[in-house]
Image (cartoon, coloured by chain):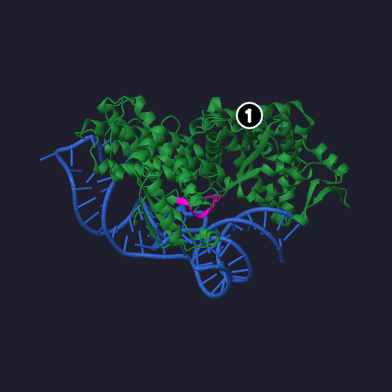
Amino acid sequence: MIAHSSLLESVSKAFNDLFQFIPENIPISFTKKEFNGDYTITLFQFSKNIGQKPDEIGKKLGQYVVEKYPHIFSSYEVVKGFLNLSVTDQYLLSKYQAVQSQWGIVNHPSGKEILIEYSSPNTNKPLHLGHIRNNLLGWSMAEILKTQGHKVIKANLINDRGIHICKSMLAWKKWGNGETPENTGIKGDHLVGKYYVLFDKHFKQEVEALIQQGLSKEEAEKQAPILQEAQQLLRDWEAGKPEVIELWKMMNSWVYQGFEATYKRMGVDFDKIYYESQTYLLGKNIVLEGLEKGVFYKANDGSIRIDLSNEGLDEKVLLRSDGTSVYITQDIGTAVQRFSEYPNLSQLIYVVGSEQDYHFKVLFKILEKLGYPQAKECYHLSYGMVELPTGKMKSREGTVVDADNLMDEMYQTAKQITEELGKVHELPEEEKKRLYEIIGMGALKYFILKIDPKKKILFNPQESIDFEGHTGPFIQYVYARIQSLLRKAEYQVTQFGNVETLNIAERELIKHLLNIPDVYKEAAQQYNPAVIANDVYELAKKFNRFYQDHPILKETNEQHRLFRLHLSYTTAQMIKEMLQKLGIDVPDRM
RNA sequence: GGUCCCAUAGUUCAACGGAUAGAAUAGAGGUUUCCUAAACCUUUGAUCCAGGUUCGAUUCCUGGUGGGACCA
């Protein structure tokens, strides 16, 4: 879809004048390269309304707009139900100049306020590749929504309490020998994760021993003493036992230090951090209120439930018979809390894996039944799992791709490739490090974000992430190359060459640039950063073709030289801006 | 038992119901006395199966097959 208003307006007017008919939306797209033209309108759907054959409609429309708007349209061609319109160089040039100030970003507020929750880690182990996907998607989506003028609140709900952290705590108490991040030099989240793994090792041994004694696997897993100890620790935590709370606070603080470093390196941030230890009791009252209102009911066993079988869902327990919460209880609670915390909030977005699809369907339905109008706007940004060739990643089995390690590897690969190419020898050491980081992270982030969120990602650690072709570094390279041009030309942005005509490569570039506002819009509407990732790649490719065939610095016509520099500059700016929406930085040289 | 998601070149990804299904990578071949060759150009190669809806289906519907997830 192309939103050049003057194009659509004139075509729409032509429809009205010729057929006394104004289409609700005109299906317009770029003309395929096999045909003559710039923009194509598909005519079939109008045939019925107008009562003429598509080709006749096309001919009349084409003739009309070319005659009436000669400054916009230079010619037309009708091919089997498609109207291909060619626009004038003058039109493209004037549009190109007109949008200089704001390429695609909506500057006026939309009035919409959105809270997007992502990351939401457990505090018992370090982040892995799956978390990277979550964080990048969440952060990127927030930036994309901002382009549409929405106010966005980035939120992180840290899962800081529960049996998982108690397991790490217990193992540390038993076998920790007072280890700390300081005295071991181990990053805090990794240290806590180490004890989580240790717990599991002992747990498995105990289970094995119990099975030898004749217990079933299920029974053995329930009765393993170490697990019962961990459960006792959780009860002590809930009772507020001071030494348990103290240990809990200490180990969580280690994890937070570790997370902070990882977040920083990934380039993600948050406006608001929630802790589950402060929210896990929320929701009970709301469920009880819902019971009074008759939205929920009490089952024979005393549990409180909702029956969603009319909605194609099942019965769902909201409060157990002993009055304790389940997962969804606190999700109801936190959602309601946010509605009152942000009275203007129109939408909640949850970035959570697709295994929770059902959970969120139920949650949103419950919120709706409780009468919260925001419920209809709630969205679960569901994404597929990151899998290894061997299958699912399992932290307890050590088959996870650790986030910190992976980022280190990306850095090393970037360093190696850059050194082999040997273009930046004379850069100071600090600059080189920064460059490797930009390239390595660019490759990683692009690799993840170019894929449709709902699809699962297969990550093969044996085949490293590419740096050539459809990759982040490819796009970064185009940016760096343009910066080199601009440096050599000592180019000032205020310089704009006056040209009358454009060649094909220039036209392609300008057409692409003019379409970027729609790309942002589409990415926002579809909740899909991959839309931007794929489009910025196309833009980079188009620049490369232009660059390959047409001299820029060496162009002898001064006005044309300046124009090409300006076009290069604009392309670089747009690459930078679009990559920024994906959290990818650009280097001035590489 | 029920629900949801996915299936496209050897591989990794694209394609508002639109024209001859695009890229990348891998394979074959070519481009550098010339603005950065992480580039550019040429070339081989794909819609899981069977029906249906219609001017037109990778896309929508029905039923299979295969993979994944969830609910009870």
The tint of chain A in the picture is green
Q: Residue at horizontal 62%, vertical 36%?
A: A116
Q: Chain of mark 1?
A: A
Secondary element type, mark 1:
strand
Highlighted range, magenta: A18-28
Q: Is residue A39 visible?
A: yes
Tell me if A75 is positioned left or right of A232 in this view: left
Please check the rendered image and state whether residue A20 is part of the magenta-colored stretch, yes or no. Answer: yes
Residue A540 sits above or below residue A44 on the image: above
Residue A570: x %, y % from top left = 37, 33
Considering the whole magenta stretch, tell me its main secondary structure: loop
Looking at the image, which is closer to me, A310 or A356? A310
Residue A60 image-quadrant placement: bottom left
Q: Residue at horizontal 64%, vertical 41%?
A: A199
Tell me if A490 is positioned left or right of A72 in this view: left
Tell me if A236 is positioned left or right of A360 in this view: right
The C terminus of chain A, quarter of image: top left
Residue A36 sits above or below residue A260 on the image: below
Q: Which chain is blue?
A: B
Residue under circle 1?
A272
User: Residue flagged by tag 1: what amino acid is it?
Assistant: Lys
Residue A588 image-quadrant placement: top left
Residue A272: x %, y % from top left = 63, 29
Looking at the image, which is closer to me, A223 or A381? A381
Looking at the image, which is closer to me, A495 or A570? A495
Q: Residues within 10 Å of mark 1 (few under 14, many from 20)?
A: few
